[in-house]
Image (tube, rainbow, N blue to C red):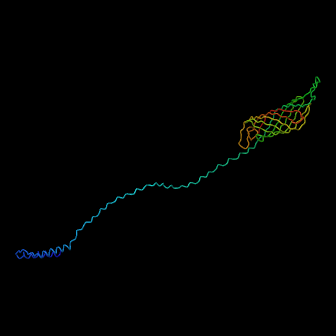
Amino acid sequence: MKRISISLVSLLAIGSNLYAGGTFSEPVYITEDFVQAEEVIVEQVQEVYVAPAVEEYITPVIEEEYIAPVVEEVYIAPAVKEVYVPPVIVTPPPPPPAPKDIVANGLYIGLGFSAARFNPSCDCSTDTDTDTGRISKIRTDKTAGIIGRIGYDINQYIGIEARGIRTNWKSNGGKVKHAGIFIKPMLPISNKTNVYGLAGYAKTTTQGSLQTVNAKALAWGAGIEYDLSTDTAKKGRYNREFDGAGDQEGGLGVFADYERLIQKSDSPDLDTVNVGLTYDF
């Protein structure tokens, strides 16, 4: 390009010189000059030719939309804070207290009426009619008197008793004295009723015109008691529903019994029926 610029300037200078002299002379163009100029231009063009920049196609960047992968949701149970629970210690209930021992206050006393029947079992004359002088044979004597008793019920099934009988009202001159100590087996049949037996050892004497008796022998009997008082039972090792045991309330009662005063071979028949009142402490 530089060489082309110089040739053009030269041409212009030449032209100017021609016009400046007042005479315009058409410039003479030499073909060689044009050819050289073209060659120079071509040469310069070839040297300077720069291929047009080819615009590089750049693929537009497409912003890829991020799609999060589908994650299957797994349920995770929330962590539960462990709380210490102390063990429950079960304390067994205390054993029930042992039944209280009840000191039995089974003491009782009694007083009553006694009717005695005495059969001496002999053919002896026992009575003489003062008016006629006739002698009659007496086989049986009936007399009456009083009975006293004192006893202690050890429990509701057994007790001991001491009793004495004395007849002062005589039918045919006979008097009876009796005293003994007895074992007393018992059986309560209701809250207030008790049946009992008597078995013991006693001394019995008789006085009068009949065959006299002075013997120490076995004696026995049976009877029934009925409680007239109101009892309050107590809890304990021993209890009974009527007076005379288990440290219950004292009170009155009634009794009735039969007693064979002498139980001995070849002895006369001597029996009593007794009724009366008792008081339980």
Placement of the C terminus among the 4 image quadrants: top right
From the viewer's perspective, tell me whether residue 245 is left or right of residue 181. Answer: left
The vertical placement of 59 against 274, above or below, is: below
Looking at this rendering, what residue extends furthest in the left direction?
A: 23
Q: How many marks?
A: 0
Decide: is 236 above or below 75.
Answer: above
**Image quadrant where residue 169 sits:** top right
Residue 59 is situated, as x and y percent measured from the top left of the image, at: 29, 63
Q: Looking at the image, is 47 positioned above or below residue 190?
A: below
x and y percentages locating residue 138 in the rendered image: 90, 28
Position in image of residue 52 (x %, y %): 22, 68
Residue closer to the observer: 48 or 12: 48
Residue 168: image location, x then y, percent: 87, 32
Please name whichever residue, 57 or 148, is drawn nearer the observer in this view of the structure: 57
Q: Residue furthest right?
A: 133
* Residue 115 falls in image quadrant: top right
Question: Which image quarter: residue 49?
Answer: bottom left
Say whether residue 280 is left or right of residue 43.
Answer: right
Q: Residue furthest top?
A: 132
Figure quadrant of the N terminus: bottom left
Q: Say which of 180 and 149 sits in front.
A: 180
Q: Is residue 69 left or right of residue 130?
A: left
